[in-house]
Image (cartoon, helix red, strand yellow):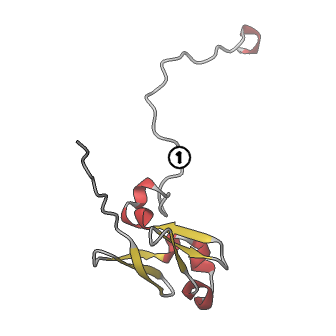
Amino acid sequence: MSTLVQRAETLAVEVSCSSDALSVTLSDGRVVSVPLVWFPRLADASAGERSDWEMIGGGIGIHWEAIDEDISVASLLRPENFMRLPNEALHPPSREPSLRKKPRTPRAARG
């Protein structure tokens, strides 16, 4: 017996960019709006370049040819999984304090 599992994927159906936000209308009716600063190439692009987009993968993402930018719907819905957001610390994850001893200073260097 086979079971058919349908995978419902949310797709982009419309895209617009203002001078400070990217807004994407999704196939389920939601509109996702994110700050343009998340995407420096889009933020630096002209209004004409931002308006010249095309769907990729049937709507799983958006492509801007002139600025070589691709943005997936998944990254808009779960940005923490796909990008480093502005103002996040650029430090490696915190570690437990090291239990190793500090290197010894040679006796000749001690005063």
Q: Which residue is mark 1?
A: 91
Against 43, residue 85 (above or below) is above
Residue type, mark 1 in image: His
Q: Residue furthest right?
A: 108
Q: Residue furthest top?
A: 107
Residue 104 horizontal side relative to residue 109, left or right: left
Against 98, residue 95 (above or below) is below
- Point out residue 72 in the picture as x, y percentages from the top left corner: 47, 66
Q: Quadrant of the N terminus?
A: top left
For the residue pair 48 and 86, the one nearer the viewer reads as: 48
- Point out residue 94 in the picture as x, y percentages from the top left corner: 45, 38
Q: Quick one: label 1, few (<14), some, or many (20+) residues within 10 Å?
A: few
Q: Quadrant of the C terminus?
A: top right
Q: How many marks?
A: 1
For the residue pair 40 and 16, the one nearer the viewer reads as: 16
- At x 27% / y 52%, what residue is drawn? 4
- Point out residue 2 in the picture as x, y percentages from the top left corner: 26, 45
